């Protein structure tokens, strides 16, 4: 069997595997999106100043939410409490902007937001639509920052990118065991599919 035929059969098999994988990821994303709320901050632009103030807004809102959210029992309660706090969240964001010398406005909403695939600690959240508390600064055209707000993986500690044990337990509590394991496995699967590009180069 010549190389072209071998390559054809390998390609056919990989297309089938990729299709099955994409279907599984979409179904998985749809399932976990019913259980979590994300926290999303959009910077005005990618300038150093706009990116810096984005993180300051994040920190101030994080401190406020950490001290005022209380013990919410489920996603519905978390969304309700967050929506009630939107005027104060907006006020805090605009206060930070004004203090730092920026004249553009801030807005806050709870709504459905499309996210690409994102890694957070050892977890990989598949791309798709999620409910989120979204803070938009100015034009909102700069790089964004995000975390998982419910269950609380944002405000548990002092370092946002480190997922603490309490946060892991909270995540386990709202997901099924299968969903939790898949959330950790997604990054490994994504890496494996990158080898397809190397395989194509090798066969050229």
Image (tube, helix red, strand yellow):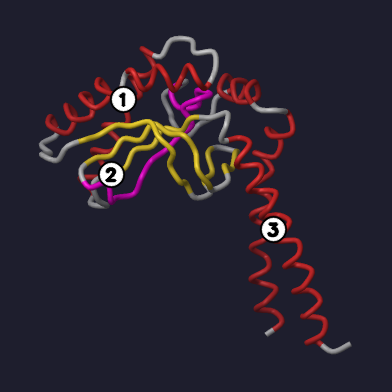
Quick one: SS at disc 2?
loop
Instruction: Decide: is 43 above or below 6.
Output: above
Disc 1: which residue: 61
Cα–Cα span, label 1 and label 3 = 38 Å
Assign the C terminus to one quadrant of the image: bottom right
Instruction: Decide: is 65 above or below 37.
Output: above
Q: Earlier in the sequence, mark 2 or mark 1?
A: 2
Quick one: SS at disc 3?
helix
* Structural crowding at the residue carrying mark 2, measured as other residues with C-alpha within 10 Å and reported as few (<14), some (14–19) or many (≥20): many
Q: Quadrant of residue 190?
A: bottom right
The residue at 59%/43% (across/down) is 124
Looking at the image, is mark 3 or mark 2 nearer the viewer? 2
Disc 2: which residue: 43
Residue 192 - label = 3
Cα–Cα span, label 2 and label 1 = 14 Å
Are the two marked residues, 1 and 3, in contact with CB atoms closer than 8 angstroms?
no
Which residue, as the protein is rendered here, is positioned at the far bottom?
Answer: 2
């Amino acid at each position: 069997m010549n190389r072209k035929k071998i390559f054809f059969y390998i390609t056919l098999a990989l297309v089938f595997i990729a299709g099955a994988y994409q279907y599984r990821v979409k179904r998985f994303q749809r399932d976990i999106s019913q259980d979590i709320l994300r926290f999303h901050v959009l910077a005005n632009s990618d300038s150093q100043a706009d990116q810096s103030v984005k993180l300051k807004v994040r920190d101030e809102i994080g401190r406020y939410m950490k001290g005022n959210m209380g013990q919410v029992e489920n996603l519905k309660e978390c969304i309700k409490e967050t929506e009630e706090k939107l005027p104060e969240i907006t006020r805090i964001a605009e206060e930070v902007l004004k203090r730092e010398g920026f004249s553009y406005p801030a807005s806050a909403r709870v709504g459905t937001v499309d996210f690409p695939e994102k890694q957070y600690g050892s977890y990989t959240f598949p791309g798709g639509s999620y409910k989120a508390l979204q803070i938009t600064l100015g034009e909102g055209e700069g790089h964004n920052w995000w975390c998982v707000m419910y269950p609380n993986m944002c405000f548990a500690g002092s370092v946002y990118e480190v997922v603490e044990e309490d946060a892991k337990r909270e995540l386990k509590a709202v997901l099924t065991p299968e969903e939790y394991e898949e959330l950790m496995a997604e990054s490994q699967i994504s890496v494996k599919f990158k080898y397809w590009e190397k395989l194509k180069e090798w066969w050229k």
